[in-house]
Image (cartoon, grey):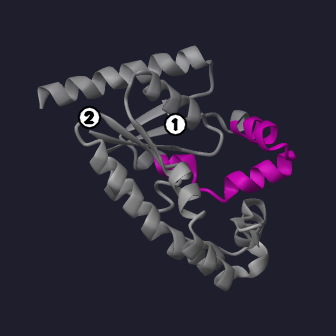
Amino acid sequence: MILGLTGGIATGKSTVAEFFREKKIPVICADTIAREITEKQEILDEISVEFGKEMIVDGKLNRKKMREYIFVDINRVKKLNEITHPPIIEKIKEEINKNKENPILVVDIPLLFEGNYEFLVEKILLITCKKEIQLLRVQKRDSVSLESAKNIISKQMSLDEKEKKSDFIIENSGTKEELYEKLSSILRGVSNAMYES
């Protein structure tokens, strides 16, 4: 089974990915692939032509500057996606193919719904948490104000919307132990369903 892992910002997806790796279940990370793709010269050239040479510093993409520049305009986000999404999808497919012998494979895609990546996976696991906890985590993680944290979260699809499209939902507002317990329960359910089918 190809299980898509997603969730809102700062809901704990990295800890969930860590859980699966500890269980010897392969995890394909879309963010890692995206970083690799944006280090390729042909992609950097396209970004430079489209968004300006100042986005490239010392032969590398200035991610902070790029983020600040594109998030004020949805059309800029779309344009960047047009450049980067096709090679990212190809690479994810390649990695899925390499790991197809595994009974369970996790594909960690933070923007799974926003990027319309659902077709890559068979089931979707969504990680959510209480809004106030999410805000605190974003503030702490990114060293930003409450206002900035609210702004960052508002740019993503709401967790309520994501819940409607997901097969499994884990609310992660408690301890790591509680999270792992919930994940173990889902893993048992997935394994049983696969065995029965």
SS for dot 2:
loop
- Dot 1 or dot 2, earlier in sequence: 2
Q: Is residue 78 magenta?
A: no
Question: In this figure, which residue is indicated by the disc labeled 1?
Answer: 127
Front-lying residue, 64 or 12: 64
- Up the image or down, 106 lies above or below 83; here it is above
* Quadrant location of the C terminus in the rendered image: top left
Q: Residue at x 61, y 37 (%)?
A: 11
Rendered image: mark on residue 146: none
Assign the magenta stretch its main secondary structure: helix
Q: How many marks?
A: 2
Whole-percent x and y of residue 122?
29, 46
- Density class for disc 2 (Cα within 10 Å; few <14, some 14-19, many ≥20) is few
- Tell me, yes or no, if residue 116 can be seen here: no
Q: Amino acid at mark 2?
A: Asn
Is 77 in front, or is 50? 50
Q: Is residue 177 above or below residue 3?
A: above
Mark 1 residue crowding within 10 angstroms, few (<14) / some (14–19) / many (20+): many
Q: Closer to the observer: label 1 or label 2?
A: 2
Residue 123, percent from left and from top:
32, 43
**Residue extending furthest left?**
197
Q: Which mark is residue 102?
A: 2
